[in-house]
Image (cartoon, rainbow, N blue to C red):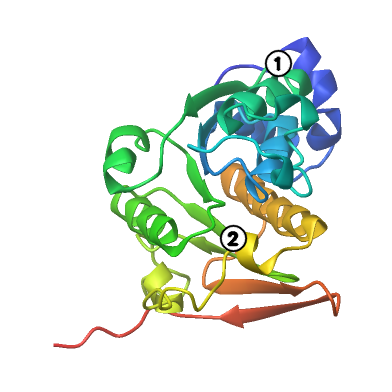
């Protein structure tokens, strides 16, 4: 691994002070390549905190542009970037925050074919998309390519986060669960309205996105217990966190 530069030692001093992270953990962050699907409400805090934490390479996948209605929650963008590609706007914000972080941009939609071409070599995949087709594609691709996946979702006032590593076994020796063990199939069209239809409180995306960034840092540095087999649910109106455990479903036939 690359040594930390003197400026990096100063920049990440508060990380290095933590015995659980230390210099070795910071070097792991520097060596990491993280692909983030979406530079929107969830992707904004994910990208900001991972760049701030010293992740060496952030690959951003988003084919959308910045619009005025985004700015209430997508805080990596601002009024001066209206009309720009989100990848471009996010890359400039990251450069201002941490010039040591390399950004790779893809103005594209994430699907299985894209993953086959671009996901290999990444340390981690983070899904901040807002539709089930992308979520299933991310889960399937992460499993097929043995890349850990942090996935999150938000509703109007609530959100959830989980971590998927179905290509590994848990402490009990059983294979870790898949995304389809949690959500066997996508809900019918129109049952779960998009943010554009139902609305979403802006700060909620910051809560869930920051939790996603924390899970990413844990996975990269090997500290703590990631949310594998656990769905963390946040109710913003009640200010309450709940955890649901889920397991790999038994296959029959």
Q: Which element carries disc 2, helix, strand or loop?
A: strand
Q: Is residue 137 left or right of residue 31?
A: left
Percent of width and height locating residue 77: 73, 34
- Look at the picture and state if 199 lies above or below 61: below
Report the side of 82 relative to 12 (left or right). Answer: left
Indicate the quadrant containing the N terminus: top left, top right, bottom left or bottom right.
top right
Tell us which disc is closer to us: 2 or 1: 2
- Identify the residue at horizontal 68%, vertical 20% (top origin): 92
Label 2: how many Cα within 10 Å (few below 14, some 14–19, many 20+) = many
x and y percent of residue 103 in the render?
56, 23
Furthest residue in direction top, as rendered? 6
**Residue at 42% over, 73% down:** 189
* Vertical side of 167 occupied by 2: above or below: above
In the rendered image, the vertical position of residue 49 relative to residue 134, given as above or below: above
Q: Please say if the residues under marks 2 and 1 sit with CB atoms less than 8 Å apart.
A: no
Residue 154 shows in this picture: no
How far apart marks 2 and 1 lie (CA) works out to 27 Å
- Residue 215 at x, y = what percent? 64, 54
Circle 1 residue: 99
Closest to the observer, 84 or 172:
84
Residue behind mark 2: 152
Q: Is there any visible trace of residue 15 in the rendered image?
A: yes
Viewed as shown, does residue 22 lie left or right of 218? right
């Amino acid at each position: 691994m690359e040594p930390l530069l003197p400026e990096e030692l100063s920049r990440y001093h508060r990380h290095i002070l933590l015995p659980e992270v230390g210099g070795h953990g910071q070097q792991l962050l520097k060596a990491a390549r993280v692909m983030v699907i979406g530079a929107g409400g969830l992707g904004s805090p994910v990208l900001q905190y991972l760049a701030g934490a010293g992740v060496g390479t952030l690959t951003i996948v988003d084919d959308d542009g910045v619009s005025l209605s985004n700015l209430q929650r997508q805080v990596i963008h601002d009024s001066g970037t209206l009309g720009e590609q989100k990848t471009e706007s996010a890359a400039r914000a990251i450069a201002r925050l941490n010039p040591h972080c390399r950004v790779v941009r893809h103005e594209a939609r994430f699907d299985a074919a894209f993953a086959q071409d671009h996901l290999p070599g990444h340390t981690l995949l983070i899904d901040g998309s807002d539709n089930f087709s992308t979520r299933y594609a991310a889960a399937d691709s992460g499993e097929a390519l043995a890349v850990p996946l942090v996935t999150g979702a938000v509703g109007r006032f609530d959100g959830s986060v989980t971590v998927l590593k179905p290509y590994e076994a848990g402490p009990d020796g059983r294979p870790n669960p898949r995304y389809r063990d949690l959500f066997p199939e996508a809900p019918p069209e129109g049952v779960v309205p998009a943010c554009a239809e139902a609305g979403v409180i802006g700060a909620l995306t910051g809560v869930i996105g920051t939790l996603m960034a924390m899970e990413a840092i844990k996975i990269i540095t090997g500290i703590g217990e990631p949310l594998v087999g656990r769905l963390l649910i946040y109710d913003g109106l009640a200010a309450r966190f709940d955890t649901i455990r889920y397991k790999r479903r038994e296959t029959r036939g």
